[in-house]
Amino acid sequence: MLTRRRFLVAAGQVAGVGLLAACGLRPPGAVPGGGEEADDAVLTARPGSGPTGSSDALPRTPGTHPLGLEADRDPLLHVPPTVVPDVPAPLVLVLHGAGGDAAAGLALLQPLADERGLLLVAPASRGATWDAIRGSYGPDVTVIDRALARVFSGFAVDAGRVAAAGFSDGASYALGLGLANGDLFRRIVAFSPGFVPPGASPQGDPLVFVSHGDGDDVLPIDRTSRRIVPELRDDGYDVTYREFSGPHTVPADITREAVDWLR
């Protein structure tokens, strides 16, 4: 089984199921499936030529807007002041950590998005965390696909500058979804990931940025990024890796470096 489709935190290397549950990881002995459910990680939305007639109701003014796709936990779109609907812009899918929401996803990059002209699309998981963290891909992928399709219909998006980013469980999900859709996401940013969820056959050759604090007691670095990064490199991915002195967080200088790297 391909490295990116196996559970990277082995049995006996974590202190029991309780820690795993708190981190959103699978319990010891869990085997990520391949099979049909892996295809559920595949997204169909792709950038087009710009605004279409079907996108008339999509907010295009600067600021943060709900997309109107879900009655509960609706995805959010953040439009920086410099973005013009018919001029190709970079776009980042931003994914919150466990227990978060769309606003928490936006908070990862929003200050710098305005500065750098990044469109941000922030979905919210249907449950307490993303579906593939505790099971298989499903409803969260559906919402993400619909959100991206809606934004792609309303803005000209630079197909070469579409990225996925996330923190904690969102970072794990960004890796799994990003590798399965590497022909869409040309870059993946994973702030303090826990593992790489199983996904469909890898597509494309996305570049990867990973950061992790050496004092992280939620997703300890020795059991996570220090294992994930070598495995990704062994699989041929170009990985930029930054360790920092600190806990389960994203320091401002790391965020800025990641945004610079996205450019």
Image (cartoon, rainbow, N blue to C red):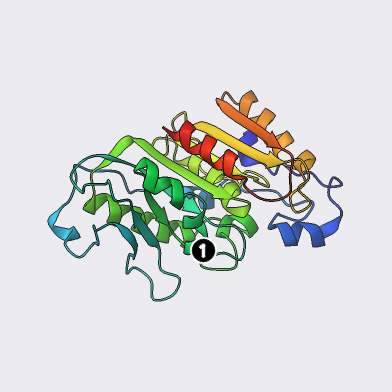
What residue is pinned by disc 1?
125
Residue 148: give x, y in percent of width and height: 34, 53
Up-down relation of residue 241 to residue 91 (above or below): above
User: Where is the N terminus found, in terms of image quarters?
Assistant: top right
- Can residue 127 be seen? yes
Up-down relation of residue 79 to residue 251 (above or below): below
Residue in the foreground of this view, choosing between 56 and 8: 56
Q: Which quarter of the figure has residue 6?
A: top right
The local secondary structure at tag 1 comes to loop
Q: In this view, does 23 lie to the left or right of 200?
A: right
Q: Which quarter of the figure has residue 230?
A: top right
Residue 16: give x, y in percent of width and height: 85, 57
Residue 20: give x, y in percent of width and height: 76, 57
How many badges with numbers are in the image? 1
Q: In this view, does 225 lie to the left or right of 175?
A: right
Residue 213: give x, y in percent of width and height: 72, 42
Name the residue furthest left: 53
Which residue is painted at 48% across and 63% down in the image?
103
What is the three-letter code of the residue carrying label 1? Ser
Residue in the foreground of this view, choosing between 109 and 208: 109
